[in-house]
Amino acid sequence: MCKYKSLSDFFDFYLLKRKILFFEWFKYKENIKDVDLLQRLYFEFELGFMKKKFYEFLFYFHKFFCNEYLECVEELDFKLCKGDFMIEIYKDFLREVEGLKLKPYRDTQGILTIGYGRNLESRGINLTEAELMLNRDVNDAIANLLDIFPNFFSMPENLRIVLVSMMFNLGKEKFLSFKKFIEAVKRGNKQAMVYELLNSKRAKQLPDRVEREKYLLLKI
């Protein structure tokens, strides 16, 4: 019988148990008694650094934890790699051989790639990944807007939608170049906002989007 109420509870325990066993493994099997050294080793391990002794520990850990893991996987109906308790080992190896690139690049075959070797041309991203990226980008846009407008959250809803749309589209540096528009926002001058929005290069490049933003502003 699984004693965890949710996957979150289970994995919290999983990570805690992994840390405890990590210290026990290196303290007794590797005869490392220095607590600071153990902490540094664990930090390296969590960052995914590949070392033979980490592989050995991972095999030991997953073997130790296997029965409880499989029991909870079954009861909590965990869909990812059901029963595959070596997934972390697979991931550690792939992190090492693929390397991490946070911006798109061309691999040795000239294929547009990102992250840990994700092929953007044949695979791209799925809806869940797209939503995660959108959520991150919206939060970044709001953070940038708060730097410029400390009262952002007290502004009318329609104005906030337009500002997020513009910041999302332009990025902070280009958004700051809309100086007259920013001043109009700070003054609360709706007519000036609409005028500056429409009399810009962006309005010619994105006429449909800017028209929708104008409609929102006029409804304030």
Image (cartoon, rainbow, N blue to C red):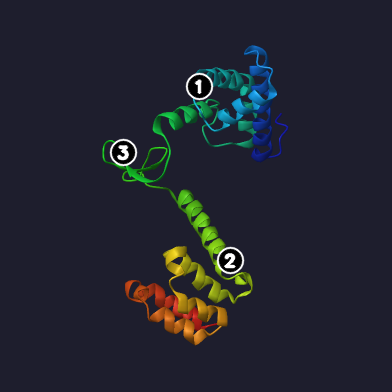
Relative to 4, say whether 184 is above or below.
below
Secondary structure beneath dot 3 equals: loop
Q: Are marks 1 and 3 in contact (CB under 8 Å)?
A: no
> Residue 170 lies in what quarter of the image?
bottom left
Disc 2 versus disc 3: distance between alpha carbons? 38 Å
Crowding at mark 3 (Cα within 10 Å: few <14, some 14-19, many 20+): few
Residue drawn 64% across the image and 38% down it: 7
Residue drawn 61% across the image and 69% down it: 150
Residue occupying the far bottom of the picture = 191
The spot of residue 164 in percent (x, y) is: 51, 67
Disc 2 versus disc 1: distance between alpha carbons? 44 Å
Residue occupying the far right of the picture = 3
Question: Which callout, 2 or 3, points at the residue further toward the start of the chain?
Answer: 3
For label 1, the residue is: 51
Residue drawn 64% across the image and 12% down it: 29
Of circles 2 and 3, the one toward us is 2
The spot of residue 162 in percent (x, y) is: 49, 73
The tag on residue 146 is 2
Q: Are marks 2 and 1 in contact (CB under 8 Å)?
A: no
Q: Nearer the viewer, residue 83 or 137?
A: 137
Crowding at mark 2 (Cα within 10 Å: few <14, some 14-19, many 20+): few
